[in-house]
């Protein structure tokens, strides 16, 4: 069973428009609303892949009860209210509006750790994904990673800013984008391969550098790979990173080799772009692009 942890869930609202013009009134053609947040979206993708998973996190009572009716999940009612995220999907662009999240109750982190201490015993892998609600200590994902690692459970941390910085040194798989990696390194090398190798050495664990349409660069176990995603996939990129994370954590749970993990993760990311909302993949796209994802070993020597 894969555990996904979400520390700042959301109600994801998607507006679909033929076009978006700033300053004008728009009549929305289609609206979808669903319970989400990055870790919840990871759990949804895993559930769609028939992978045993359990979503865990912090929320309010209404969110926790509603999600439990849809997915195997346990969310502690520790937030004043769950935030909303709004995606405006138009033909020419996708615009996202994120609310910051609501205050967590004092001691919420300790209660969540107590819950996870019981759950990790039966886990095959664990991921902490997304932002932290106000009041949640920035080192909570790192503490969760160490708790899982002590139980022999592989961990993926998809974080940013202070929480990502606090996770360096845990040995968990980290998935920064290029800007986040540059902030971690301070004076980052111009060559992204050198940067990833340097960060992996500093971290003492695997790094998967996400680069959007350029794919990713990964360093793990003394080797590095460059991943080129499939081209020509049109749709909504919101949720692609969560599907990619689902592919990585699924591979970790099954002990697959890194090239296989990276290929599967890239294909799932593309399949999420082709799906209408975050937390889903288009299974036909996934099947059609999987074999065509290029994962090349990088024999790169630093100057």
Image (spheres, rainbow, N blue to C red):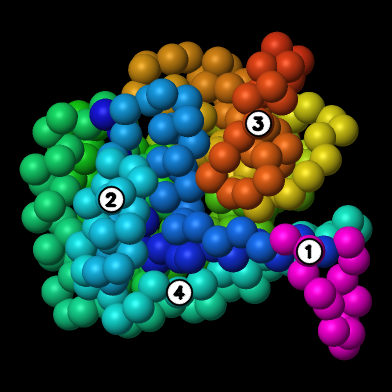
Q: Residue furthest bottom?
A: 23
- Give the main secondary structure of the magenta stretch: loop
Of badges 4 and 2, the one in the foreground is 2
Q: Which mark is residue 29?
A: 1
CA–CA distance between discs 2 and 3?
24 Å
Find numbered disc 4 in the image and state the secondary structure of the residue it sits on.
strand
CA–CA distance between discs 1 and 4?
23 Å
Q: Earlier in the sequence, mark 3 or mark 4?
A: 4
Residue 302 is one of the magenta-drawn residues: no
Let me know if residue 204 appears in the view: no
CA–CA distance between discs 1 and 2?
30 Å
Residue 22 is one of the magenta-drawn residues: yes
Find numbered disc 3 in the image and state the secondary structure of the residue it sits on.
loop
What residue appears at the point 87 percent right and 33 percent down from the top-left corner?
232
Q: Which residues are magenta?
A: 18-30
Find numbered disc 2 in the image and state the secondary structure of the residue it sits on.
helix
Q: Is there a contact, CB below 8 Å, between mark 3 and mark 4? A: no
Q: Which residue is mark 3?
A: 282
Of badges 1 and 4, the one in the foreground is 1
Q: Which residue is mark 2?
A: 68
């Amino acid at each position: 069973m894969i555990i996904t942890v979400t520390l700042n869930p959301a109600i994801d609202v998607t507006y679909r428009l033929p076009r978006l013009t700033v300053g004008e009134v728009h009549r929305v053609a289609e609206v979808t609303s669903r319970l989400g947040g990055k870790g919840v979206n990871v759990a949804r993708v895993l559930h769609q892949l028939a992978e045993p998973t359990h979503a865990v996190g912090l929320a309010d009572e209404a969110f926790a009860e509603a999600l439990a009716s849809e997915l195997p999940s346990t969310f502690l009612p520790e937030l004043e209210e769950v935030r909303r995220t709004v995606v405006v999907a138009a033909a020419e662009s996708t615009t996202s509006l994120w609310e910051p999240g609501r205050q967590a109750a004092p001691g919420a982190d300790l209660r969540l750790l107590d819950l996870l201490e019981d759950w990790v015993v039966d886990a095959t892998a664990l991921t902490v994904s997304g932002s932290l609600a106000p009041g949640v200590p920035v080192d909570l994902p790192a503490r969760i990673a160490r708790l899982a690692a002590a139980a022999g459970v592989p961990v993926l941390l998809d974080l940013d800013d202070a929480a990502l910085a606090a996770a360096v040194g845990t040995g968990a798989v980290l998935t920064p984008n290029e800007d986040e990696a540059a902030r971690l390194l301070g004076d980052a090398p111009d060559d992204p391969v050198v940067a990833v190798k340097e960060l992996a050495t500093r971290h003492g664990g695997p790094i998967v550098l996400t680069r959007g349409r350029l794919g990713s660069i990964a360093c793990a176990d003394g080797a590095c790979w460059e991943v080129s995603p499939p081209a020509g996939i049109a749709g909504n990129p919101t949720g692609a990173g969560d599907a990619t994370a689902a592919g990585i954590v699924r591979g970790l749970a099954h002990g697959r080799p890194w090239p296989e993990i990276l290929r599967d993760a890239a294909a799932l990311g593309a399949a999420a772009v082709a799906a209408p909302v975050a937390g889903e993949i288009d299974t036909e796209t996934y099947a059609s692009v999987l074999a065509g994802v290029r994962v090349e070993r990088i024999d790169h020597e630093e100057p």
